[in-house]
């Protein structure tokens, strides 16, 4: 029986995974020497598995759902961009105050969640945004804006989380998605983990090749997919 959903991360995950698997297949002859199990057969099977999953569990979207999907993509991308930029600014602005940097990174969630978030883990990104917004005390906030960090950037990050929370149906984590049965959750989670591992290795391999590196950066792929989604106006 087909399971219909609205704007969940399962849809987003499989779309991005499918694009990354395609890039992996196109570069398999170059990447095959890195791991003994990275063969042309494996690359083809990976593409087929993702295609079958999408066909089985992701129904065709209406215009309205496509727009919701596009909005979810945009929110993920802009959230990661700003929270990553703020992390860099904290390091630079407070390089002479390592105690504050340590405190800020610990309390705002960077230490525990940023690494996984920047590698495409929606769970970690959502929790990072939540931790940041919850633990942003007036004292930390005032300290952050005491130099040159724009207050607007901090406010945007908090607003992004509020919007995520208000539209949590778009950011359901795969393992919490009540609209997917256990088999679907397991298969999608396995693909997601597999693709994330490929991304980690491929981005390291293509460190000096920006074009190919970006093909294996989860959020850059997501950004590319977002640009491809139609800008269609629908009647509510």
Image: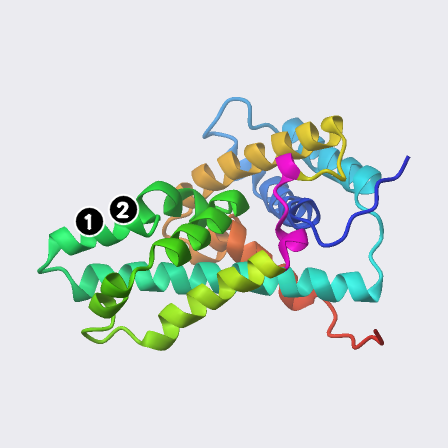
Residue in front for this viewpoint, 20 or 170:
170
Near mark 1 (Cα within 10 A), the count class, few <14, some 14-19 or many ≥20, is few
Is residue 214 rendered magenta in the image? no
- Left/right of residue 76 with respect to residue 172 in the rendered view: left
Quarter of the N terminus within the rendering: top right
Q: Position of residue 221 (x, y in %)?
A: 57, 55
Give the magenta part as a residue range.
167-176
Residue in front for this viewpoint, 24 or 185:
185
Residue under the image location 22 percent in, 76 percent down: 148
Q: Position of residue 45 (x, y in %)?
A: 70, 30
Choose top left, top right, bottom left or bottom right for residue 203. Answer: top left
Q: Position of residue 71 (x, y in %)?
A: 65, 65
Furthest residue in direction front, as rendered: 138
Furthest residue in direction top, as rendered: 36
- Tell me the element at label 2: helix
Q: State the mark number for residue 46.
A: none
> Which residue is identified by label 2?
106
Residue under the image location 50 percent in, 50 percent down: 126
Height in image: 18 above or below 235? above
Height in image: 196 above or below 88? above
Q: Position of residue 121 (x, y in %)?
A: 51, 44
Residue under the image location 68 percent in, 52 percent down: 169
Q: Main secondary structure of the magenta part?
A: helix
For the residues bearing labels 1 and 2, Cβ distance under 8 angstroms:
yes
- Left/right of residue 172 with respect to residue 31 in the rendered view: right
Furthest residue in direction right, as rendered: 1
- Left/right of residue 170 with respect to residue 131 in the rendered view: right
> Which residue is identified by label 1?
102
| Residue 223 visible (yes or no) | no
What's the image's color scheme?
rainbow
Instruction: Measure the C-alpha gap from mark 1 to mark 2.
Output: 6 Å
């Amino acid at each position: 029986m087909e399971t219909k959903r609205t704007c969940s991360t399962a849809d987003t995950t499989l779309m991005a995974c499918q694009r990354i698997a395609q890039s992996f297949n196109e570069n398999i002859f170059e990447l095959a020497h890195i791991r003994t199990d990275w063969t042309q057969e494996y690359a083809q099977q990976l593409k087929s598995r993702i295609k079958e999953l999408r066909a089985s569990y992701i129904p065709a979207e209406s215009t309205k759902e496509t727009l919701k999907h596009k909005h979810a993509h945009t929110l993920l991308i802009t959230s990661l961009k700003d929270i990553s930029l703020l992390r860099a600014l904290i390091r630079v602005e407070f390089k002479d105050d390592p105690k504050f940097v340590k405190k800020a990174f610990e309390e705002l969630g960077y230490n525990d969640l940023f690494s996984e978030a920047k590698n495409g883990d929606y769970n970690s990104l959502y929790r990072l945004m939540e931790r940041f917004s919850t633990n942003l005390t007036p004292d930390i906030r005032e300290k952050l804006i005491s130099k040159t960090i724009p207050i607007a950037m901090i406010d945007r990050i908090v607003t992004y989380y509020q919007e995520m929370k208000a539209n949590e149906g778009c950011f359901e984590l795969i393992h919490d998605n009540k609209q997917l049965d256990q088999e679907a959750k397991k298969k999608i989670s396995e693909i997601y983990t597999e693709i994330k591992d490929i991304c980690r290795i491929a981005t390291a391999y293509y460190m000096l090749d920006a074009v190919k590196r970006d093909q294996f950066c989860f959020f850059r792929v997501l950004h590319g997919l977002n640009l491809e989604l139609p800008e269609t106006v629908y009647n509510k």
